[in-house]
Image (cartoon, grey):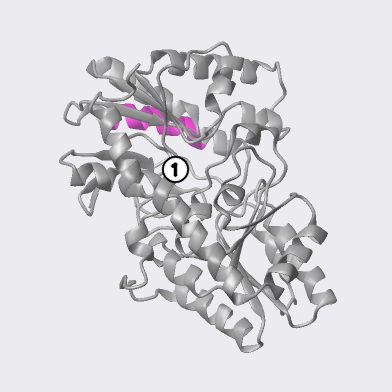
Amino acid sequence: MVNHYAVGPDMPGGTRHYSLARELVARGHRVTIFAASFNHGAGRERIVWGRGLVRRQNVNGVRFIWLRTVPYHGNTVRRQVNMLSFLPLFLLAQAGETRPDVVIGSTVHPFAAFGAWVAARVRRVPFVFEIRDLWPQTLVDLGALRMGSPYERGLRLLEAHLVRQASAVITLLPGIRDYLRGQGLPDQHVVYLPNGADLASFAPDAAPPVPDRATADVLAAIARLRSEERFVLGYVGAFGRVNRVDLLVAAATIAEARAPGRIGLVVVGEGPERRAVEAAAAGRREVAVATSVPKTQVPRVLRALDATVVHTTRTPVYRYGVSFNKLYEYMAAERPIVFACECAYDPVEASGAGETIPPDDAEALAEAFLRLADTSADTRRAMGAAGLAYVRREHDFERLGETLAAVVEGRLPAG
């Protein structure tokens, strides 16, 4: 598996590939994940030190090969250099490894997936292309890339090449076939494999690891808000441009003005917009901003909350659906969700796990916070139970792992 942004369970971030790899290992496969050692969310090097360029690590039976890429802060040109530096390091590192049976290349970004295709071609094995994010469409929709520019056209050509060369296209987006057809690309080899949750780690009787310092700080912040008899909502995820966590802070501030002492908000994470979030929350007693916690501690944090919230700015690419990892973890923790997102295939509406409202509106968010706080405990428990049932049915990693096993074993796609 080649995913620039893959992380292990002891780190913050999306552990999709680690969780899927664990399922493959349980079925007798040997799995190696190639990933960058520079952590995007934290904005710092975490694994490869000194003059080293590569570090090999076994994490619960899953092999990681960490590649040291160029450091950066924010969405500057150095981030592009960071992405490009991953490609040659991967090609060199994989050359010394045992010949695989299948190579999976995952976006974002497409350069890592291109490297996976090159490796598969050289090794003469099947290449599987995983589309986690639509590049360049997402960049165009966000206004970060001009339609028709040389870079946009180049990324389109690269995307088309990878789709056509793949023996299977794994996608997290339920509406991806519409996108591919719109681009004049084949779609008969698409396999839907969304994000999910490790339900065993969210079970009430699961023994969570001893809290680290970051987790203890988050739990203390929640306890402080609870001691004030506030209804505590939480966000655990990235602080990026799309997430607009600062808008969540603004909503909590509005709710505090309307109903003093009623709402508390804890936002947990890292990312390029963290400073803006901290500035917005400065001096606000109803808001706590905490640093990211290891993935193994996320169930403990979520279970300490009364409810959860997801906000993502209005983005046209969501017409093909969404698959936010944090959303399914919120559901697995049986916490009701305020979902501020405009998308097709809305999982919160489909599951009955909470309330969907329009994005980019702090007033609407504040009203939703207060409505949920005033909802009966029985109704909130029913929302939580509905979310858990939905995840168990559609997004349990054990079930998703069986689908991936069928792909790497050549049983999917079938026709």
Residue 253 rendering spot, x and y as whole percentages: 78, 70
Between 133 and 174, the residue placed more toward the observer is 174
The residue depicted at 37 percent of the width and 72 percent of the height is 204
Residue 406 in the image: above or below residue 286 = above
Chief secondary structure of the magenta span?
Answer: helix
Residue 140 vs 402, above or below: the answer is above
Q: Quadrant of the N terminus?
A: top left
State the residue at coordinates (37%, 22%).
168
Q: Nearer the viewer, residue 369 or 275?
A: 369
According to the image, label 1 marks what residue? 5
User: Residue 144, image x and y in percent?
Assistant: 70, 33
Residue displayed at 28% across by 19% down: 126
Image quadrant where residue 156 sits? top right
In which quadrant of the rendered view does residue 264 lie? bottom right
**Disc 1 residue type?**
Tyr
Q: Position of residue 357 (x, y in %)?
A: 72, 53
**Is residue 85 covered in magenta?**
yes
Residue 89 horizontal side relative to residue 178, left or right: left
How would you rate the neighbour count of disc 1 (Cα within 10 Å): few for under 14, some for 14-19, many for 20 or more? many
Q: Is residue 329 visible?
A: yes
Query: Can I make out residue 289 in this image?
Result: no
In the image, is residue 287 above or below residue 66?
below
Instruction: Write the start and end of the magenta stretch as one range.
Output: 82-93
Quadrant the C terminus occupies: top left
